[in-house]
Amino acid sequence: MNPTTAGTDHHIGMIVPSSNLTMETELPRMLRAREQTDPAHRFVFHSARARMQQVTPEQLKAMNAQAERAATELADARPDVVATACLVAIMAQGPGYHCTAEDAITTALRAEGASAPVVSSAGALLSGIAALGAKKVSIITPYMKPLTQLVVAYIEDAGIEVLDALSLEVPDNLAVARLDPADLRTHRTKLNLAGADALVLSACVQMPSLPSIQPVEDQAGLPVLSSATATTYRILSELGLPTTVPDAGHLLSGNCPDPGDITRPTTAATS
């Protein structure tokens, strides 16, 4: 094999809301940047979609019901890891539901002979916070306030105090994807960060934030993460690769330990 083309292709399966425009841009952007520093490991992406247009409890629950069908479709591509993307769809079902969702997707994959581990953006955010050693966080979400409160309750059930939460109140999922990530640099100044161990700049894989992660971390002087950076962290961890992506915040600096299964409660929630 030509040494310039030698290397390993890692196949990433993604279950995304049908109206999501950001999962398939920010995650590949981070992993493409990683390829520049470690060209021996390349990443290939495969998506299955689940219908959802409005970020409402009804549509979120209906989308969750499509996850096993989407996983069955992805199984045919024999991915090395599968990530399911809508954080609030899982957190709105009650504390611990990421375990239920991950297990259901795993079962669907195994039934089709696929052995890929499963990562949810909801579980990944908890893992990322744990990896940072953070006990107190402040968060920004695009959700309406009642949904943000469900996210806060979910995070706090995992033993993490949410000091402050800012809701941008954008119910249309396409409109969320069109929010300017640069605005997050201003939005974060509205949050109480006194005593915070970390800032969740985007508690939503659909709300773009990547261009602001490192600048806000540098300005705020504390670790900054997002659902997307946390999902990337878990993907790399599941692949057994160093969790390094340039200019994507401390979580992806390669200096955070793998928290393992500490975010999986003994009893998972049911819908």
Image (cartoon, rainbow, N blue to C red):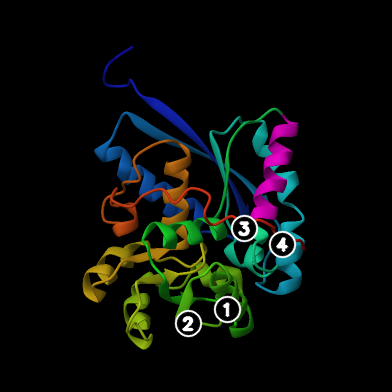
Q: Is residue 79 above or below residue 29?
A: above
Magenta-colored stretch includes residue 107: yes
Number of numbered discs visible in the structure rendering: 4
CA gap between label 2 and label 3 equals: 24 Å
CA gap between label 1 and label 4 equals: 19 Å
CA gap between label 4 and label 2 equals: 24 Å
Q: Residue at x 45, y 58 (%)?
A: 228
- The first of marks 4 and 2 along the sequence is 2
Q: Mark 2 points at which residue?
A: 165
Instruction: Answer yes or no: is residue 72 visible.
Output: no
For mark 3, give the secondary structure.
loop
Q: Which residue is drawn at 29% across and 14% down?
A: 2
Q: Name the residue under label 3.
A: 265
Proximity of marks 1 and 2: CB atoms separated by less than 8 Å: yes
**Label drawn at residue 269:** 4
Q: What residue type is labelled 1?
A: Thr
| Numbered disc in front, either 1 or 4 | 4
For mark 4, give the secondary structure.
loop
Q: Mark 1 points at which residue?
A: 148
**Which stretch appears magenta?**
99-112
How far across and how far down the image is residue 246, in percent? Answer: 26, 50
